[in-house]
């Protein structure tokens, strides 16, 4: 693949595409060498992939580079998709690992939050309400940014990408219980932040 895929200049982290396509069929065509299929795959998924990456690396130039790395990986390894998960789950798993690689290149001694956490059951009902009831998008973004990196990831994937806890666990390569624990702590921090901000 000779032409580098261009990333968006900037993506809205909270905007999701709504069109659904036969992504598995596209991957099969990509595996057969179709650049047209790759371009269509990029058109359909680049916003969701980019928003996930930028939330992890916090730098537009790095996010654009990682997006290109992800699409190159899709081009090279489309045939490796085995249908055990949704295509979005598979490609965001690639994006997760490429984002970690980017962060480690930037800061080789950076401590990443990939450890196993205490399993803590989380009642998912209530967490969406916290986000849905918050009308001030700027304030919501501010509070989300106050979360730890691992907590931001699960919030972004579960609510803004609308993935199940099981899918989030697959993408992050961690137990589902760890996802629930991170969400539990994220929910508490979001509640506290939003209450303090609205009280002020």
Image (cartoon, rainbow, N blue to C red):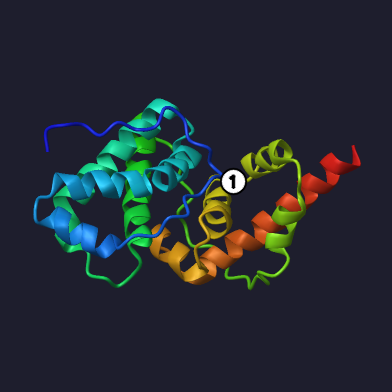
Residue at (30%, 73%) from the top-left corner?
A: 84
Q: Are there few (<14), some (14-19), or many (20+) residues within 10 Å of tag 1? A: some
Image quadrant where one finds the C terminus: top right
Image coordinates of residue 47 in percent, x first then y, are 42, 43
Is 137 placed above or below 173 here? above
Q: Is residue 151 left or right of residue 111?
A: right
Q: Is residue 6 left or right of residue 141?
A: left
Q: Secondary structure at mark 1?
A: loop
Image coordinates of residue 27 in percent, x first then y, are 21, 58
Seen from this angle, which residue lies furthest left?
Answer: 32
Residue at (63%, 45%) from the top-left corner?
A: 147
Tag count in the figure?
1
Is 7 placed above or below 122 here? above
Is 168 placed above or below 10 here? below
Seen from this angle, which residue lies furthest right?
Answer: 199
Image coordinates of residue 12 in percent, x first then y, are 53, 37
- What residue did someone put label 1 on? 148
Q: Is residue 9 left or right of residue 195?
A: left
Residue at (54%, 56%) from the top-left corner?
A: 154
Q: Is residue 22 left or right of residue 16?
A: left
Q: Nearer the viewer, residue 91 or 45?
A: 45
Image quadrant where one finds the N terminus: top left
Quadrant location of residue 99? top left
């Amino acid at each position: 693949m000779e032409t580098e895929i261009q990333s968006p200049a900037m993506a809205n982290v909270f905007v999701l595409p709504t069109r659904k396509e036969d992504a598995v069929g596209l991957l099969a065509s990509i595996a057969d060498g179709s650049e047209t299929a790759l371009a269509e795959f990029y058109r359909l998924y680049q916003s969701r992939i980019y928003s996930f990456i930028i939330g992890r690396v916090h730098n537009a130039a790095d996010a654009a580079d990682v997006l290109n790395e992800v699409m190159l990986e899709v081009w090279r390894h489309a045939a490796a998709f085995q249908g055990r998960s949704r295509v979005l789950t598979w490609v965001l798993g690639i994006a997760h690992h490429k984002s970690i690689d980017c962060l480690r290149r930037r800061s080789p001694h950076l401590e990443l939050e990939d450890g196993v956490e205490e399993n803590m059951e989380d009642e998912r009902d209530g967490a969406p309400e916290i986000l849905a009831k918050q009308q001030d998008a700027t304030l919501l973004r501010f509070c989300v940014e106050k979360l730890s990196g691992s907590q931001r990831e699960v919030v972004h994937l579960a609510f803004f990408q609308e993935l199940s806890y099981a899918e989030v666990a697959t993408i992050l390569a961690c137990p589902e219980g760890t996802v629930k624990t991170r969400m539990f702590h994220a929910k508490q921090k979001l509640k506290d932040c939003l209450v303090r901000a609205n009280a002020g």
